[in-house]
Image (cartoon, rainbow, N blue to C red):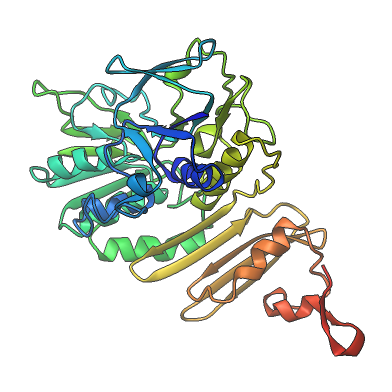
Amino acid sequence: MKYVIIGVGAAGITAAEELRKLDKCSEITMVSEDQFVHSRCMLHKYISHERDEKTLNFTSEDFFEVNNIDWKKVGVEKIDTANKEVVLLDGDVVKYDKLLIATGANSFIPPVGDFRNASNVFGLRHLRDAQAIDKMAEESEKILIVGSGLVGLDAAHGLLERGKDVTIVEMAPSILPVQLNPHAAEEYQRKFEEAGAKFYLGCKADKAECSEDGKIHAVTFDTGETVACDMIIVAAGVRPAVGFLEGSNVEVDRGIVVDDFMKTSVDDVYAAGDVAGLSGIWPNAMKQGKTAARNMTGMAEKYEDRFAMKNTMNFYGLVTLCLGNIREEEGDKVVEQEDSKNYKKAVVRDGKLKGILLQGDISHSGIWQYIIKNEIDVDFKENIFDITFADFYGTGERGKYIWNY
């Protein structure tokens, strides 16, 4: 059997590991535009010089040798599903019996002025992005970051660590608008401002023209305000990396369309991770890769963990965990607690916990994801924050503890 995996991110690497565990003898080839295996969650630490290419690697140094995997460090031009071939950018052709597409996603650069043409505008999704940002940061002082989600703030944090002048523009009225409510976000904004960052909230980039040197040196917002810059980092969302699939008959919607077994619309072709559009969080990408690998070897295992609403962050020592949907609707019960070091918010709908936000101390929080995913009734507790695992155990025969759910 010839297994081919495109992509060396969380889904691809996990799939390769599982394939080798299940099949000791077959060929495994991995293909990637990336020259290094790396954690995209840690790219900001590359920009801040806390880590390098070697310490961003989340596998063992001898991973490919130990697992007898051939890694081709070159991009993909196209996939010929009729002949079961992957055509590489260098002209090489790799044949497969089973193929896994785990190419992840690329940064989306919006069509604002000359954003897509300028040589000093970057996304931050891959190590090659971080490498380009790091190089240009050597000669740049004023950095404009478009978007204040996790990627935007990661970039801001890394550049502030290097003493750069960082400005962040955000369309929403508060930062981290997808992950947090305004009250929790305010704490992070204050910490970033103390570190030197400046924020423009409730506005968006509107005009940006290239100078003769091919760079944008100033961006005007829709409010009429203008900010000078030497470099721009755009953190305005991502798009699945599927450009090479044109003409392949692999169905693509918001991502590659897969069934419950991670199989695409084409026989013997599977997809996992961000490119499949099921979830943008690291643990789920790994689970998808593992499930795809098991099915590629002939098993029939469904991927069932589609819970993607989880975010954990830690900036300047302040830790936050957000699970589920914390946007309350009419009729919801909202419970909040706050002291000098902690803030908690829970949204309960029809007796079921829909979302919870913990800022500060997030210890003993493992129970909340289980409660949300399994839609367990929480009305039995007057104060939802007093719930513990003990509430879900009963006593059986001879005093033995029994899990009731």
Res 110 seen here: yes
Q: Position of residue 77 (x, y in %)?
A: 36, 17
Q: Position of residue 351 (x, y in %)?
A: 81, 63
Q: Position of residue 165 (x, y in %)?
A: 17, 52
Q: Give the residue displayed 59% in from the left and 38% down from the top.
A: 292
Q: Position of residue 30 (x, y in %)?
A: 39, 34
Q: In the figure, 232 relative to 86: above or below?
A: below
From the viewer's perspective, is 247 left or right of 115? right
Q: For residue 7, which quarter of the picture?
A: top left
Determine the residue located farthest toward the right in the rendered image. Answer: 397
Q: Give the residue displayed 22% in from the left and 60% down from the top.
A: 50
Q: How many marks?
A: 0
Between 139 and 229, the residue placed more toward the observer is 139
From the viewer's perspective, is 121 left or right of 337? left
Res 227 seen here: no
Determine the residue located farthest toward the front in the rendered image. Answer: 25
Q: Give the residue displayed 35% in from the left and 52% down from the top.
A: 153
